[in-house]
Amino acid sequence: MTHQADSKRRSFLKGAISASTLALVASSGLLLPRRLLAHWPSDAFTAESVEDALLALLGEAEVADAKQIAFKLGAPPSYAVNGASVPVEVRSDLKNIERIAILVEKNPNPLAMSVELTPDVVLPFKSMIKVAEDSEVIAVVRADGKLYRTSRDIAVDIGGCA
Amino acid sequence: MAIKARDRIRAKLIDEQTIVRVLLAHPMHTGRGKNEQGELIPAEFIQDIRCWRNGREVLTIKCGTATARNPYFSFQLAGGASGDKIMVRWVDNLGAKGIAETTLS
């Protein structure tokens, strides 16, 4: 457990430095780590691999591949000219969806967004994300305590992570 | 922010479902981009977006830096009646806040 916490912390620091946001983190994050973590899962959002991000966000990275999720990406057919705004759409027949996470595998920080739903919300959920380079984009859905994952590849002409 | 655009929200009742569309005005700097002088632009991005219907929280979106500039979200709420108040509030990593509100017609 200690080891895990350490490695998370290390990747958090590494991410912060590589993004040259150390000053910002020092002013907003490190001084109030608890409040910030409670408010926003910074471990998950600064993780540098899909597995780390999922682990930090959902506490597990074991995911079943799912046919029950329809996941659309980019203008059809899965092609984005400009990576700065790539449309994503998540639909699903699954019941009791608690959370949707959208990750871009090759982005410097893969986790793009995490959506917490109440039973009032009905899919589809649509949004726009940035994609740095040709990459796999992953949607992970937690429903009834189980994780389901589906992914699409996307080709990007202009990288969008500036 | 040079251009002061407004956050927009639209809600529509279709087939007994409330379709909510939200467009927030925000630069969403990742902290990796550079300005014309080649200096890094500090990170400035929305972290937390919450949506309420009639005072009840229905949706929370946590964003990382990979959410596109001027973030757009669309989702549906089960049911809905004319006069429902849909409200969205956001907070970014620097503590800036915004509210957008609409009434279902």
Image (spheres, coloured by chain):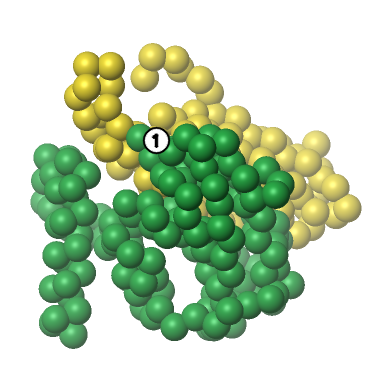
Name the image quarter holding residue A128.
Answer: top right
Name the residue at 44% across, 15% down. B3
Question: In terms of depth relative to the viewer, which is nearer, A40 or A148?
Answer: A148
Q: Position of residue A72 (x, y in %)?
A: 66, 55
Identify whether B39 is placed above or below A151: above
Quadrant (top left, top right, bottom left, bottom right) of the N terminus of chain B: top left
Say what amino acid the circle numbered 1 marks. Answer: Met
Taking the image as shown, residue B16 lies to the left or right of residue B34, namely right
Q: How many marks?
A: 1
Residue at 57% across, 36% down: A81
- For label 1, the residue is B28
- Nearest the eye: A130 or B43: A130
Q: Is residue A4 above or below residue A69?
A: below
Q: Residue at x 17, y 72 (%)?
A: A7
Tag 1 secondary structure: loop
Q: Kindly indicate which chain is depicted in green in the rendered structure.
A: A
Expressed as whole percent of the image width and height from the top left, the position of residue A34 reads 20, 61
Tag 1, which chain? B
Instruction: Relative to B87, say whether B8 is above or below.
Output: above
Determine the residue positioned at 64% across, 50% down. A78
Up/down of A151 relative to B45, above or below: below
A144 horizontally vs A16: left or right? right
Res A128 seen here: no
Label the yellow chain with its letter: B
In the image shown, does A125 or B57 lie closer to the viewer? A125
